[in-house]
Amino acid sequence: MAGPPTADKSLENQPMACKKCLFFLFLFIIAGRLVFGASETQEKALWTLWSLQTNNPAQHEAIVAACQQMQETSPANPLFPVVQGLAAWHSLHLGKTNEVFVFLDAMASAAPTTPTAVATSTTVATSTTVATSTTVATSTAVATSTAAAGAEMGRRWLTRLDREKVRGALAVYYRNAIEYPINLQPLKKTMQGEKNAPLPLADRWGAPWQYQLTTFKVIKGTRGQRYLLQSKTLGESSDLAKALERPYAGHILFQPVSMTISGNGTQNVVFQTPGDRPEKILLSEGGQAAGVTLTYIGAQILILCDGDHWRVVLKPTK
């Protein structure tokens, strides 16, 4: 005669097994957050720093000190290129060139290339059924968008600083010859930079300087009294002094409006351009439009970059 059925003891362990599964899932989510993005604490720290930047943009010493403190307290922060960029820009205004090179060299060596993004135009209907022009940008290198943008920013500012060294060597040459050279080769033979280092005769992308003698518009017949010196990449924005005159993030004017999720789960941000005829722009992380790249979509913040400056904005809640 068969005995009474016994309880399946494996069922008794199911609540504990579920708890273990949830625990490991929680660890996986946290680990993924640390690997692929910044933590909410790190985002809050950057937002606090950015608030100091926007509220007191002329407080160069205070902002540099805040950047250095953030580096000490959170050295592994994946958003640190933003901190380095701010520290370098304010240190430039303070004339602390040695510190600037440290910040920018670290940025430039963080990633070898920038992400590539292709922007295409499309038309979408708004809630008022009025069609508006919308730019959709997608990225082929999402994971390192902030690091890549920081590396490019570092190269841009380092190129401007290198150009100042070449300008200094040209000034020395002029004092001796009472004219500027036809090309930069004489500088290579006779001039050296700081600490006997050779002069940088190429920009930070490896392209030779675009150098040529120019003439005065009014005074005719002069020779070797003026020159044009530019980076092939930067062009007319090669001049350090002029670049520093620009208000920080003054050209990053996109305003975030809302969030969308594409079919593959990618987050997108809908931005609106300023002006009388605003347009909607849809960007995913790494996407670019009008010279501005969306480098980071976080839990609470978004990060934009125009090549020379960063801008941190709050992420839309809808």
Image (cartoon, helix red, strand yellow):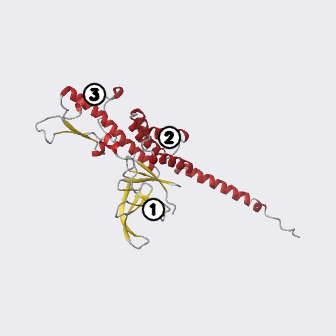
Q: Alpha-carbon distance for marks 2 and 1?
A: 30 Å
Residue found at x 86% / y 68%? 4
Q: Which label is found at residue 191?
A: 3
- Asked if one can make out residue 238 in the rendered structure from this viewpoint, the answer is yes
Q: Position of residue 59 (x, y in %)?
A: 44, 41
Q: Indicate whether 296 appears above or below 197.
A: below
Contact, CB < 8 Å: mark 3 with mark 2?
A: no
The extreme left residue here reads: 221
What number is the disc on residue 66?
2
**Which residue is found at the position 41% from the left and 58% from the top?**
138
Location of residue 156 by image quarter: top left
Q: Nearer the viewer, residue 280 or 20?
A: 280
Q: Which quadrant of the figure has residue 186?
A: top left
Dot 2 alpha-carbon crowd within 10 angstroms: few under 14, some 14 to 19, many 20 or more:
some
Q: Amino acid at mark 2?
A: Ala
The amino acid type of the residue labelled 1 equals Val
The answer to which quarter of the image holds residue 125 is bottom left
Other residues around mark 3 within 10 Å, as few (<14) / some (14–19) / many (≥20): some
Residue carrying label 1: 257
Earlier along the polypeptide chain: callout 1 or callout 3? 3
Residue 303 in percent (x, y) is at: 45, 52
What's under tag 3, amino acid-wise?
Answer: Met
Callout 1: SS: strand
Q: Position of residue 119 (x, y in %)?
A: 36, 59
Disc nearest the viewer among 1 and 3: 1
Residue at image point 43% right, 50% down? 311
Q: At numbered mark 2, what does the secondary structure look like: helix, strand or loop?
A: helix
